[in-house]
Image (cartoon, helix red, strand yellow):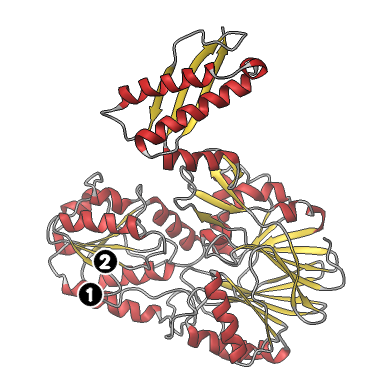
Amino acid sequence: MTPGNELLFLALGGSGEIGMNVNLYGCDGKWLMVDLGMGFADPQYPGVDLVFADLEFIEERLDDLLGVVLTHAHEDHIGAVPYFAADLGVPLYATPFTAYLVRDKLAEAGLLDTVELIVVENLGSLSLGPFEITWIPLAHSIAEGNALLIDTPYGRIFHTGDWKLDEEPLVGLPTSAAELTAIGEEGVLALVCDSTNVFNPEPSGSESAVRDGLLATVREFAGRRVLVTTFASNVARLQTLAEVAEATGRRLCVAGRSLDRIIRAAQSSGYLLKLPERVDFEQAMDLPRGEVMILATGGQGEPRAALARIAAEQHPLALDAGDVVLFSSRQIPGNEIAVGRIMNQLAANGIDIVTDRQSHIHVSGHPGKPELQALYSWLRPEVLVPVHGEMRHMREQGRLGLAEGIPHAVVQQNGDLCRLAPGKPGRILQVRAGRLVLDGDIIAPADGEAMVVRRRIAANAVVTVALAVSGNGRLASGIEIAALGLPLDEDMDEFAAEARADIERAVHSLKGGKARDREAVSEAVRLATRRAAQRWSGKKPAVQVLLREA
């Protein structure tokens, strides 16, 4: 579909889920993409780390795509760039800090000379076809979080990106209430808004309050080694922790490649310029326990991150009984088991654990209900389009917006093509909006045969049967059976013997053309093997038949 004289909105990712944000605006025959993010796999994708939005819709319309504008540098907004930007073939636009991290990704993928990355200064703007785009700084848990003010011939869009309200963010200077009110007075057709924390009845809180909470908490543990884990991308938190380390007489030691990368990006963009000199791992271990603070990645339970290796005693940095780990981050839904595993390892070693449930050491980067209500009152949009959330979050924000006096709420999900203007806003068409997975080095459909089979194998094991048959369908060899994952360690020989007998009977029962049909023979062997495995184990394994003609 080519946009006509109208303003369209289409989410290919990030609506109906938290993460993987990819949004499209269509106007006067052209498309604009906002963000190109990824998600992290869950157990339904065994063997997979990364998940992407399927871009088929826009890939079929690349001649009409003008560019990709990026709101900020979190992975769920830029993580898919190295995998798809070259194929899209249009420029990327980002503010300096975001551009630095995107450039790193492109360099790692060998795409620096292939993908055009254009740096837009903070508070900058540009024109792309019918779209006039201005970056509007808002507070978030990363440097240079931005909303996008998108002017079109059919009305103005305020696309929030990820945001919160914070009068003392410590890093960056967000747009004020007065400035947002001025934008609202000029007229806002549609507010496309983050829904993540809509169920939170309280404001998210200020980074300055976290500084006070961390300072008080670290002071409680004088004389003890303290490790703090937080999101590497939270530049304001890194600044906070540096200040806390200095205020408590501790040297700062940083463990984790992503932290090193973020610090380089921040300093190259004018942030963290007063970060104190850090000590290396060996120096940190030589310091008195109460004179060091370790800042480490891994607060979400990542198995290869610094905290996991420290907890497993596989890292040059070590924690002993009586030391303390502060989790200065929110536990992302889905990571509970992984985080709990690391916490249990730490606890087993006598290490104390403090989370935001016990002390005020973290605030969210997303708006609670009072912040949403404040933004509505300042911008006074005609239409609210909730995004960045599961359906329950987006529907709740739709209800909230209507209750606050916004005339229209369009609660959509990935694949809903919505017309925002002219006329009554709402969905006009459903388009494909699937998922892709990075499986090894291959990007494949998330619902493809490989992933379906892998789920079956993970749940029910796999059995391989090898045999030979003659031209007339008679067995011409012994039957070899190998099983992986069946819970029959002590009974494997007996199961295999019974399965061989079942297979022989199944092959001998085939008559006429079926006995000479290799597909029919293979299917008979498969079914006989599977039935035997189910009798013995209660499982229905995937069965692979290796059939050759003698």
Q: Where is the N terminus found, in terms of image quarters?
A: bottom right
Label count reads 2
Q: Nearer the viewer, residue 285 or 302?
A: 302
Neighbours of disc 2 within 10 Å: few (<14), some (14-19), many (20+)? many
Amino acid type of disc 1?
Thr
Please state if 310 lies on the left or on the right of 502 as rendered: left
CA separation, marks 2 and 1? 9 Å
Q: Secondary structure at mark 1?
A: helix
Q: Amino acid at mark 2?
A: Leu
In the rendered structure, the answer to whether residue 226 lies left or right of residue 148 reads left
Residue under numbered circle 1? 217
What residue appears at the point 29 percent right and 59 percent down from the top-left corner?
340
Is residue 405 or residue 130 the one in the foreground? 405
Q: Position of residue 349 (x, y in %)?
A: 15, 54
- Describe the element under mark 2 as helix, strand or loop: strand
Q: Position of residue 185 (x, y in %)?
A: 69, 92
Which mark, residue 372? none
Residue 388 visible, this angle: yes
Q: Nearer the viewer, residue 540 or 20?
A: 540
Name the residue at 30% across, 58% down. 278
Relative height, residue 409 to residue 505 (above, below): below
**Which of the 4 quarters of the picture holds residue 222?**
bottom left
Checking the image for residue 326, the label placed there is: 2
In this picture, is 448 found above or below 410?
A: above
Q: Residue at x 64, y 64 (%)?
A: 414
Q: Quadrant of residue 404?
A: bottom right
Confirm or deny contact between disc 2 and disc 1 (CB under 8 A).
yes
Q: Residue visible at 34% across and 77% down?
A: 210
Instruction: State the quadrant of the C terminus.
Output: top right
Q: Is residue 195 visible?
A: no
